[in-house]
Image (cartoon, rainbow, N blue to C red):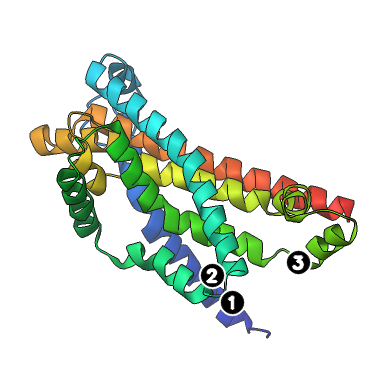
Amino acid sequence: MQYSRSAQVAIWIYVVVVLVLLYLPIFPPIATSISPTGRQPAIDSVTFKWYAQLANNPMLIESIKTSIKVALMVGFITPLLALSAALAVRELKVPRVILLLMLLPLFIPGISLGLANAFFFQQADIAPSFWTILVVHVLWALPFAFLIVLTAISTFDPVYLESAYVHGANRWQAFMTVELPNILPGVLASATFSVILSFNETVRTSLVQGPLNTVQTYIWSRYLQVGLSPSTYALMSLLILITLVLIAGLLIFNLRKGGSERLNA
């Protein structure tokens, strides 16, 4: 379908407006974090003293360590569970039931799901700890990881598996040597997305964290106590940067993977 020039201009204007509305709120905190006063965006001078102060906060350092540990474990566990569920959708005779059960948590309000998890741990006599945070984060990231892996599997042609069977491979061998390498970008994407979701989760974490803090619950508690401060702006900016770097790395990996596949073809 060919659009007229005026229609193309209108579409581009719409796209630009949407992008501005999406990303404009990111820039004031970043600009304020490098302002000498820490109260308004920097215009004529830049400082990184607010970033340097972050290293002198032991509570923040411990919160960051907890977030990193949880996020890495979520990034390892969640894709495995998502891959199992995605394969079950294809192999079992009740794909719609599995799909519904996997996506149902997305439609439950976060605070309600968090309270339900906290109540379950309380009834099971499980004290809030690192492990309760990990469980909640995995449950939160799993539906998203599942969708990513399911999309990757849906693009895989089963004829390659049939060819492996013909050449004597069993199911496990065919999966490991043929299917998994082809859907690996999707699995890695689900891992990266799970890490990002874990690192940025606040509401559910606050209900099951106990004495521990993640970096997001630390920011939220500091905001409730003293409001926004220059150091908080610096921390927020770092988290935004980390998220963008992870997404950029994932995009670069997928582009290189796609380029190499086209060359091999």
Label 1 residue SS: helix
Q: Quadrant of the N terminus?
A: bottom right
Classify mark 3: helix, strand or loop.
loop
Q: Residue at x 62, y 67 (%)?
A: 91
Looking at the image, residue 50 lies above or below residue 243: above
Q: Residue at x 35, y 39 (%)?
A: 134
Query: Nearer the N terminus, badge 1 or badge 3?
Result: 1
Q: Residues within 10 Å of mark 3 (few under 14, many from 20)?
A: few
Q: Which mark is residue 158?
A: 3
Which quarter of the figure has residue 236?
top left
Classify residue 167 as left or right of residue 230.
Answer: right
Judged by depth in the image, the label closer to the viewer, 3 or 2, is 3
| Residue 12 circle label | 2
Relative to residue 162, is residue 227 drawn left or right? Answer: left
Distance (Cα) linking label 1 and label 3: 40 Å
Q: Residue at x 60, y 49 (%)?
A: 187
Q: Nearer the viewer, residue 152 or 131?
A: 131
Mark 1 residue crowding within 10 angstroms, few (<14) / some (14–19) / many (20+): few
Q: Amino acid at mark 3?
A: Pro
Amino acid carrying label 1: it is: Gln
Q: Nearer the viewer, residue 223 or 150?
A: 150
Q: Quadrant of residue 47?
A: top left
Residue 6 visible (yes or no): yes
Residue 8: mark = 1
Furthest-left residue in view? 225
Between disc 1 and disc 3, the foreground one is: 3
Q: Amino acid at mark 2?
A: Trp
Task: Quote the CA–CA distance across marks 3 and 2.
Answer: 39 Å
For marks 3 and 2 on the same chain, the one whose residue lies earlier in the sequence = 2
Q: Are marks 1 and 2 in contact (CB under 8 Å)?
A: yes
